[in-house]
Image (cartoon, helix red, strand yellow):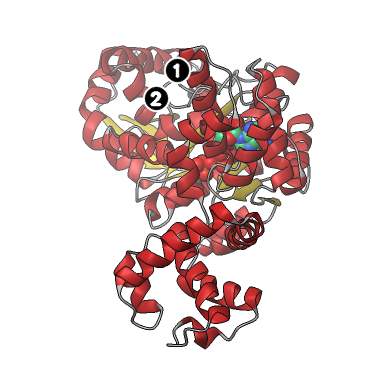
Amino acid sequence: MPPQSSGELAAGWARIRGRLREEVGEVEYRTWLRQMTLAGIEGEDAIILLPTRFLRDWVNSHYGDRLRSLWQAEYPEVRRIDIRVSASPPPEAVLAGAEERAGTERIDGRGLAEPLAPRPAETRPAPEPRSDWVVPLEARFTFDTFVVGKPNEFAHACARRVSEKPASPGFNPLFLYGGVGLGKTHLMHATAWAIRAHDPQRTVAYMSAEKFMYRFIAALRSQNTMEFKETLRAVDVLMIDDLQFLIGKDNTQEEFFHTFNALVDQGKQIIVSSDKSPSDLAGIEDRLRTRLGCGMVADIHATTYELRLSILQAKAAAAQVAVPPKVLELLANKITANVRELEGALNRLVAHANLFGRPITVDSAHEVLHDVLRAHEKRVSIEEIQKKVAEHYNIRLTDMSSARRARNVARPRQVAMYLAKQLTQRSLPEIGRRFGNRDHTTVMHAVSRVAELMEADAGFAEDVALLRKMLET
Ligand SMILES: Nc1ncnc2c1ncn2[C@@H]1O[C@H](COP(=O)(O)OP(=O)(O)OP(=O)(O)O)[C@@H](O)[C@H]1O
């Protein structure tokens, strides 16, 4: 019996889809079949619409026979299935699963997706990003534990602003950049926590660019890009850390570009971090770089001594450990590369003190952290030493390698050799060569003579210590 009315036909079509869904399973159905729309029955043909040629061909070859059998079981007079391409289904889409189309995507010929109209928020709650897709937020990375100073105050203010008002004009995307270990991830997590605290309904997805790529590749491999796209495009805030990872990864960049556009078009917030500014991201496609730079770009600068000291004070207080100010000053002075290393050094000191039940002192800090402190000692060259010492004793630089033996020249030369031994990794023969091809025994003698004199003469020792300090800082 042919269907009598469009209502009857819609019910029959819903049954066919329901059976197909049961047979192929939810994931496959959602990936390939959910966008099917029934245009109607023409003679012996059931006319089904799909939005792209790619989908039409796929459904035809993989599900054509099954669809025909299911149709015949429902309506024996239907003998053929005619699948056509139509980007916008006719208004009588009552015949199809219109509710299923909300927010779905279209696949282009290369298997990459473009968004259809934005998903109306009320049609379906946004799915939570799958837990294995997103990295859990670090509990201690909050605004409360982030110490603000000159180098990071602008980035911090931007992150605060975005957390209070996501996607506000001028702040989307928020692009945070700066050197390794300077707090980009901390600021992103803090923003995520604050957004969630303010509105628990908002879905915030945080992941590294690397994770984004691996998820994308896995989705491609399992032919499940629809789910990948849909999940990401349903979030309210997307955070991608260490974007520089995508340099040279053209396909993932393209996918990210589409995700980016879809989210920004829907008024969703994007936050990205990188070790370089958008304009310096060579290897990232121009159109993506342009989009990344068109919101707010905030630089986190290298730390200053003051910021390092404040961070150490805050971390020691949080750990409830008494660390003498001199020790904190030592660390802030010596460990300048980044906050991660600074934090690591403090943690080591605290762990050591706990383990042995000893108080933390400047001496114990030197002992426990000797490797770190040495690694951070300023590299000084023999030339610099010779120059500084010559200036200090008011002799000519050429006298450092001359044969002159007058005391007013020989003594400064010995001091320079002593400092070269103390402050560089050079061997005695090499130091000798740099001081006018002198023998290594001459250098050895100079080193022990200067040490003796320092013991005997406090004024001389002070002089040498001053020179050393000037060279080290
Ligand atoms: N201003 C700050 N206040 C408190 N802790 C900080 C601050 N800046 C950085 N940190 C701490 O330093 C460590 C490294 O920070 P984070 O991981 O955020 O750096 P990053 O810039 O993302 O580094 P990478 O470039 O390696 O990804 C973290 O433990 C973080 O809590």
Q: Nearer the viewer, residue 334 or 275?
A: 334
Q: Nearer the viewer, mark 2 or mark 1?
A: 2
In the figure, 421 relative to 129: above or below? below
Image quadrant where one finds the C terminus: bottom right
Identify the mark at residue 30; answer none if there is no mark: 2
- Work out how far the residue at label 2 is from the one at label 1, CA to CA, in angstroms: 22 Å
Identify the mark at residue 9; answer none if there is no mark: 1
In the figure, 374 relative to 238: above or below? below
- Residue 369 visible somewhere in the drawing: yes
- Residue 58, horizontal then vertical, whole percent: 28, 38
Asked whether, in this view, residue 431 is left or right of residue 374, the answer is left
Number of numbered tags placed on the structure image: 2
Q: Label 2, secondary structure: give it.
A: helix
How packed mark 2 is, by other alpha carbons closer than 10 Å (few <14, some 14-19, many 20 or more), is: some
Ligand 1 neighbours mark 2 (CB distance < 8 Å): no
Q: Residue furthest front?
A: 456
Asked whether, in this view, residue 155 is left or right of residue 118, the answer is right
At 38% from the left and 66% from the top, the residue drawn is 445
- Residue 255, horizontal then vertical, whole percent: 45, 46
Q: Nearer the viewer, residue 468 or 111?
A: 468
Q: Nearer the viewer, residue 139 or 287?
A: 139
- Residue 198, horizontal then vertical, whole percent: 75, 20
Task: Tell me the kind of residue under disc 1.
Answer: Leu
Task: Tell me the kind of residue under disc 2.
Answer: Arg
Image quadrant where one finds the N terminus: top left
Quarter holding residue 263: top right
Q: Earlier in the sequence, mark 2 or mark 1?
A: 1
At 78% from the left and 45% from the top, the residue drawn is 169
At 59% from the left and 78% from the top, the residue drawn is 390
Quadrant field for ligand 1: top right
- Residue 261 visible somewhere in the drawing: no
